[in-house]
Amino acid sequence: MTRHVLALDLKDDPKLIEEYLEIHKAVWPEILESIRDAGITACDMFRAGTRMVMILEVDDTFSFERKNAMDEASPIVQKWEAFMWTFQLAIPAAKPGEKWVIMDQIFAL
């Protein structure tokens, strides 16, 4: 099992953050299906203030290239992602157009 950790920021607006948290209590079923279909076996998200961290556990079928292609081909995923940008901001380390940024592991025990 492989694990990836990614980071993203939320807009610094308490009302938007509260709405974002509520939305994630009932993620659209099609989004959950797209996550699983991409080979993601577990997805955990954490928040500290406006900083978000997402931990993905993936199987051998997963690749970011495949997931991106699947997402680009899905109108419902595109709708979800556009909606999520209402709440999200790229972190300073993001490249132009990059949303969630893959974090580098610097320590393991």
Image: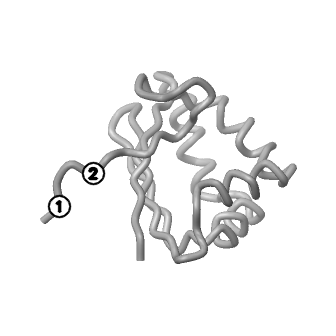
For label 2, the SS is loop
Q: Amino acid at mark 1?
A: Ala
Residue at image x 42%, y 58%? Answer: 4
C-beta proximity under 8 Å, tags 1 and 2: yes
Q: Which mark is residue 108?
A: 1
Q: In the picture, which quadrant includes the N terminus?
A: bottom left
Question: Which residue is the site of mark 2?
Answer: 105
Instruction: Judge the density around disc 1: few (<14), some (14-19), many (≥20) Cα neighbours within 10 Å.
Output: few
How many angstroms separate mark 1 from mark 2 (CA)? 8 Å
Front residue of 72 and 16: 72
Instruction: Judge the density around disc 2: few (<14), some (14-19), many (≥20) Cα neighbours within 10 Å.
Output: few
The part of the image, by quadrant, that contains residue 88 is: top right
Q: Which mark is residue 22?
A: none
- Please tell me whether residue 98 is drawn above or below residue 4 in the rendered image: above
Q: Is residue 75 left or right of residue 16?
A: right
For label 1, the SS is loop
The location of residue 23, given as percent across then percent down, is 63, 48
Q: Amino acid at mark 2?
A: Gln
Q: Is residue 104 left or right of residue 73?
A: left
The location of residue 63, given as percent across then percent down, is 58, 62
Residue at image x 68%, y 60%? Answer: 66
